[in-house]
Image: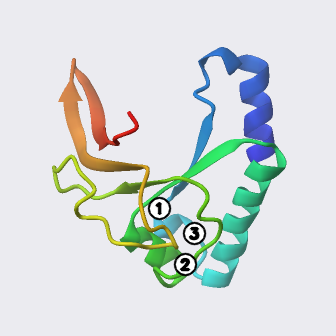
């Protein structure tokens, strides 16, 4: 799937591609009930990103990570930046608790379902933005 997606982007819309693929790791109802199967699938996604020299990151939350992989301590390639979700309406990382091996995040989604200019958006924070 990573190969197909990157091929499509490079062929059809490379000029508007931000250059980073975010792996959306949430929604345990969409994943297997087997944490071993989920770990293997996730590792294959990360490996495919590296195989295609794609810049990837991970979007998740501690509760989602634990539900999908069986523990917050499961870790695979923490060199990928983490964009975590915690809807506390606070634009800072002061609430961050380590999970997945990450000791610091890249970005935080701190508010969801907000309307701006008549569009529904989620609000995010990062000192890098």
Q: Residue at x 22, y 18 (%)?
A: 117
Q: Which picture quadrant has residue 13?
A: top right
- Closer to the camera: disc 3 or disc 2? 2
Label 1 belongs to which residue? 26
Q: CA distance from mark 1 to mark 2?
A: 10 Å
Residue 69, image x and y in percent?
55, 78
Mark 3 and 2 residues: CB-CB less than 8 Å, in contact? no
- Closer to the camera: disc 3 or disc 1? 1
Q: Residue at x 20, y 29 (%)?
A: 115
State which tag comes first along the sequence, 1 or 2.
1
Label 3 belongs to which residue? 31
Quadrant into which the C terminus falls? top left
**Residue 1, visible in the rendered structure:** no
Q: Which picture quadrant has residue 116?
A: top left
Q: Which picture quadrant has residue 94?
A: bottom left
Q: Residue at x 35, y 42 (%)?
A: 126
**Residue 16, visible in the rendered structure:** yes
Label 2 belongs to which residue? 69
Badge 3 crowding class, 10 Å Cα cut-off, few under 14, some 14 to 19, many 20 or more, is some
State which tag comes first along the sequence, 3 or 1.
1
């Amino acid at each position: 799937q990573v190969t197909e997606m990157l091929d499509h982007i490079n062929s059809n819309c490379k000029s508007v591609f931000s250059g980073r693929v975010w792996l959306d790791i949430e929604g345990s109802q969409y994943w297997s009930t087997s944490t071993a199967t989920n770990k293997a699938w996730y590792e294959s996604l990360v490996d495919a990103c590296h195989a295609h020299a794609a810049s990837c990151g991970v979007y998740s939350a501690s509760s989602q990570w634990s539900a999908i992989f069986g523990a917050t301590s499961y870790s695979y390639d923490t060199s990928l930046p983490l964009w975590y979700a915690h809807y506390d309406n606070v634009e800072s990382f002061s609430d961050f608790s380590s999970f997945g091996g990450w000791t610091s995040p890249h970005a935080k989604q701190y508010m969801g379902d907000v309307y701006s200019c008549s569009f529904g958006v989620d609000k995010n924070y990062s000192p890098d933005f």
